[in-house]
Image: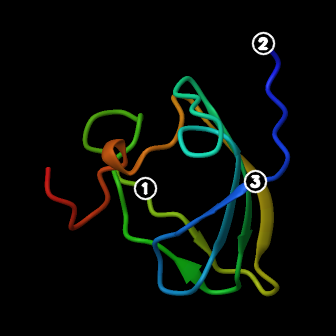
Amino acid sequence: MVKLIRKPTELKAHGNKPKIIEEFIGRVNSGTKAFSIARMNSPEGWSEPGRTVIVPKGEWVQYSTPHRGGARYIAVCLPAFSPAIVHRDGDQQ
């Protein structure tokens, strides 16, 4: 059955400044575990703790928005984003 997504769900973001995450499809808004699609509005100077992701073993990534004016973008995650699978610095493993 087709499911109408009337509006996104705003999710809390990690980081040093407030960042707006609006999930349209994903674990929270639609119950979808295979993928997620979210609109991000990241302010200038925002950063979050580093993390390990699906990259060669031992690689480390830190997302940030260093440029003036911040950034607006669409994030697509496979599988759907979940705090349980992020593995940010400082998280209990």
Q: Amino acid at mark 1?
A: Val
Query: Residue 41 lies in what quarter of the image?
Result: bottom right
Q: Amino acid at mark 2?
A: Met
Residue shown at 35% from the left, 56% from the top: 51
Q: Secondary structure at mark 2?
A: loop
Q: Is residue 18 above or below residue 61?
A: below
Residue shown at 55% from the left, 87% from the top: 17
Q: Picture coordinates of residue 39 (x, y %)?
A: 76, 56
**Residue receiving disc 2:** 1
Task: Tell which tag, 3 or 1, sits nearer the viewer.
Answer: 3
From the viewer's perspective, tell me whether residue 1 is left or right of residue 62: right
For marks 2 and 3 on the same chain, the one whose residue lies earlier in the sequence? 2
Task: Tell which tag, 2 or 3, sits nearer the viewer.
Answer: 2
Circle 3 residues within 10 Å: few <14, some 14–19, many ≥20: some
Q: Secondary structure at mark 3?
A: loop
Q: CA distance from mark 2 to mark 3?
A: 19 Å
Q: Nearer the viewer, residue 36 or 75?
A: 36
Q: Picture coordinates of residue 45 (x, y %)?
A: 62, 86
Q: Secondary structure at mark 1?
A: loop
**Residue receiving disc 3:** 8
Q: CA distance from mark 1 to mark 2?
A: 38 Å
For marks 3 and 1 on the same chain, the one whose residue lies earlier in the sequence? 3
**Residue receiving disc 1:** 61
Query: Residue 48 lies in what quarter of the image?
Result: bottom left
Please tell me the numbered disc located at residue 88.
none
For marks 1 and 2 on the same chain, the one whose residue lies earlier in the sequence? 2
Residue extending furthest toward the front? 1
